[in-house]
Image: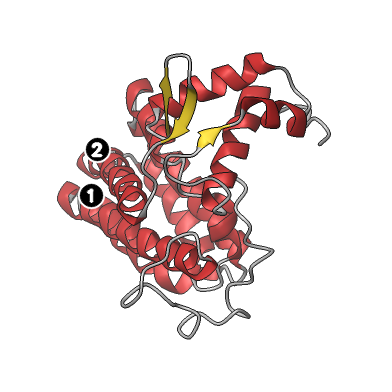
Amino acid sequence: MPKKYGIKEKDQVVTHVLNLLLTGKLRSGDRVDRNEIAQGLGISRVPIQEALVQLEHDGIVSTRYHRGAFVERFDESTVLEHHELDGLLNGIASARAAANPTPRILGELDSLLRSLRASREARVFAETAWEYRRVVNDEYAGPRLHATIRASQNLIPRVFFMTYQHGRDDMLPSYEEENAAMHRRDPEAARAACIGRSELMAKTMIAELCRRGVFARPGELGDTSAAQPEAEIPREPSTIVL
């Protein structure tokens, strides 16, 4: 695989390992093969070790002395937990924004909300939504909160939501609620909007992972092929690459 210039090799490895997880090629308890990664990505073992340190810090893998790195528990509850943390953490920044909104920030967010309303393509909506979050977090999240939010997003793949065709209909109401809460200076409502959106994203992501066979659970979220036909969430375009 050719190197991707402009992207840190460590970040390439993190992305690669997460992609293996989210496509079912690595599962709970599996050993992470450093040699296979080095050969597949065409990089040395140094950035691989750096990536594994980050992944262990983020709760994705655990290292065992003289045995290597192994995938931590990865199941529906893990995905739910990552989204739950992401909602809580983003909710902190949004609550701060609602407690102390400035005309400049409200103006930027109002403009982005109008773009979200006008978005008809999944990719445009997702990219605008990420920009909305960036504006809030850059203004109201400190370095520690920023770092923790980034860690919580490891199992929230951007590319999936850029191809998920129901993203606007599902997510727009929560952005409307969050924006309105900021205007009326209601921190708890802004926080609740972030938490609710993350819960919905988690359910959507789990349904897709079940459909792909990464998670196998009969019943409520097991076989979602009837509810989400292949044409609605295409397999190849939504392949998870963070």
Q: Position of residue 19 (x, y in %)?
A: 59, 46
- Confirm whether residue 227 shows in the render: yes
Instruction: Please name the residue shown 55% across and 69% down the image.
Output: 118
Indicate the amino acid at tag 2.
Arg
Q: Is residue 112 left or right of residue 62?
A: right
- Can you name the residue that lies furthest to the front here? 67
Q: Earlier in the sequence, mark 2 or mark 1?
A: 2
Q: Is residue 71 left or right of residue 84?
A: right
Label 2 and label 1: CA atoms lie apart by 9 Å
Instruction: Say few, some or many: other residues with alpha carbon within 10 Å of mark 1 (under 14 / 14 to 19 / 20 or more).
Output: many
Instruction: Please name the residue shown 46% across and 49% down the image.
Output: 156
Seen in the picture, residue 52 relative to 236 is either above or below; the reply is above
- Confirm whether residue 8 shows in the render: no
Secondary structure of the residue carrying numbered label 1: helix
- Can you name the residue that lies furthest to the right here? 2
Q: Quadrant of the N terminus?
A: top right
Which of 235 and 140 lies nearest the eye of the viewer? 235
Residue 86 sits in quarter: top left
In the picture of the structure, the residue carrying the numbered disc 1 is 191
In the picture of the structure, the residue carrying the numbered disc 2 is 96
Q: Position of residue 92 (x, y in %)?
A: 25, 39
Which of 67 and 174 lies nearest the eye of the viewer? 67
Marks 2, 1: nearer the viewer: 1
Instruction: Please name the residue shown 57% across and 67% down the image.
Output: 119
Residue 200 sits in quarter: bottom left
Q: Is residue 98 left or right of residue 47?
A: left
Indicate the amino acid at tag 1.
Arg
Which of 83 and 44 lies nearest the eye of the viewer? 44
Instruction: Say few, some or many: other residues with alpha carbon within 10 Å of mark 2 (under 14 / 14 to 19 / 20 or more).
Output: many
